[in-house]
Image (cartoon, rainbow, N blue to C red):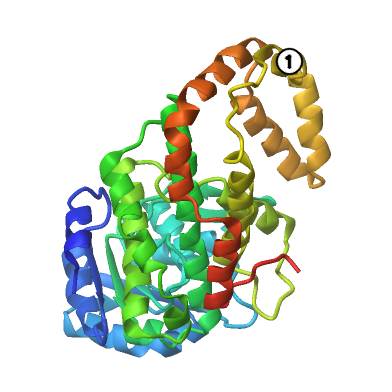
Amino acid sequence: MTSTRITKALAHADDTRRIEIGSGILSCTGPLFAATTGAPEAMIIADETTWNLAGPAVRAALTASGIALADPLVFPADPPVYAGYENVTRIRRRLAESGATACSIGSGTISDLVKLASGELAHPYVHICTAASMDGYAAFGAAISKDGFKITRACPAPAGIVADLDIIATAPPMMTANGYADLTEKFTGGADWIIADALGIEPLAPFAWGLVQDGLREALAHPDAARTGERGALEGLVEEAMLAGLAIQAAQSSRPGSGVGHNFSHQWEMEGYGLDWPLPLSHGAKVGIGTMAIAAVYDAVLSHDFADVDAAKVAASWPTPQENEARVRALQSVPAIAEAAVGQAAGKYISREEIPSRVAAIQEVWPQIRARLRSQVPPAAEIRDMLKAVGAPTTRQ
């Protein structure tokens, strides 16, 4: 079943043509694969866990629609497959050698690996979701590590997506908590966008904004029900996750789907933090902690009115480019991260001469956006309680 909101969003998506969400719907995989890819042959890509969940049913659905099947590529369940570029290379080579089109089964890691491998081959593909664990299923771009650095690499979103709620409900509760935590960052990410718009840095895109923000609070309103796998709560989370990805397609920017909170996750992933857990600490879990931290920053910032800020004093104490580089390097102990961070910081650096006009711009817009930001971002304590209720981590410890 495709909701009205998703149908409306698909009309503005560049890559994704169909999304099906419902219970007991794996049988629609064959017709959806044929309609969205036009490919005569499929290769199912999964890990052992997701293959056992859905592999045989997906294989049967593809066969019933007359789709030929190449030998599947199934990664081991232990250790969990990692979103490293070496696995992208493995998938791309298998697809190229077989001439088949990917039909992937899994959550975030399998999704991103197949997304980039298919993108490098310029092939459409279909993805079968096995958990409500993240919000990137329908987004273009894949977060992949290469040479010690993790960034979102350009590649199209899947042509078709199937989200069977009966399969998703069997996922470990922590995976649902991860997806819930990932979605909380839309609060602070939205606030970041409000500020960028007010300062003339990046204008709001009303359609994409509405896709994400209009239903966000309702989707996150039932953490206890989501934790126990109640179908209505899961469906709300899955739909909101899909809309976030479709908003990214509509805006042709990651801005609708992420803000500063995502940087916490990428930093920790590049440091290798959380890899020694019984299961790796997920992207969503780290994003949730980052969201709580950024919400605390907003708690502090919103207590000020900035009217009395002396722009000349701010400019006088502003770091030079060299001082700014030294500051960034001092914060980064991993050389590969430090070099990339220095480059990004240089690209975003505001010169001392620009400070007075930037301060004046903030002072001008602050009275108008302060109340909007207060309504956009729940207090950090409230976000912490939401994360606790769904079973997501709230600290790095």
Total marks in image = 1
Residue 97 position in % (x across, y down):
41, 64
Q: Which x, y percent locates residue 110?
A: 48, 69
Which part of the image, by quadrant, shows the C terminus?
bottom right
Left/right of residue 23 with respect to residue 221 in the rendered view: left
Residue 237 image position (x, y, % from top left): 38, 70
Compared to residue 17, the image places residue 41 above or below, namely below
What residue is shown with label 1?
313
Foreground pick, 120 / 281: 281
Above/below status of 1 relative to 35: below
> Does residue 324 show up?
yes
**Residue sitting nearer the eye, 99 or 294:** 294
Q: Residue at x 22, y 84 (%)?
A: 27
**Which of the two residues, 70 or 273, is positioned nearer the viewer here?**
273
State left or right for residue 290 relative to residue 177: right
Label 1 neighbourhood size at 10 Å, few (<14), some (14-19), many (20+)? few
Q: Is residue 280 left or right of residue 237?
A: right
* Mark 1, secondary structure of its residue: helix
Q: Is residue 265 above or below residue 235?
A: above
Query: Which image quarter holds the N terminus?
Result: bottom left
Q: Residue at x 76, y 35 (%)?
A: 328
- Residue at x 40%, y 61% (from the top left corner): 96
Residue at image location 82% in from the left, 46% down from the top: 333
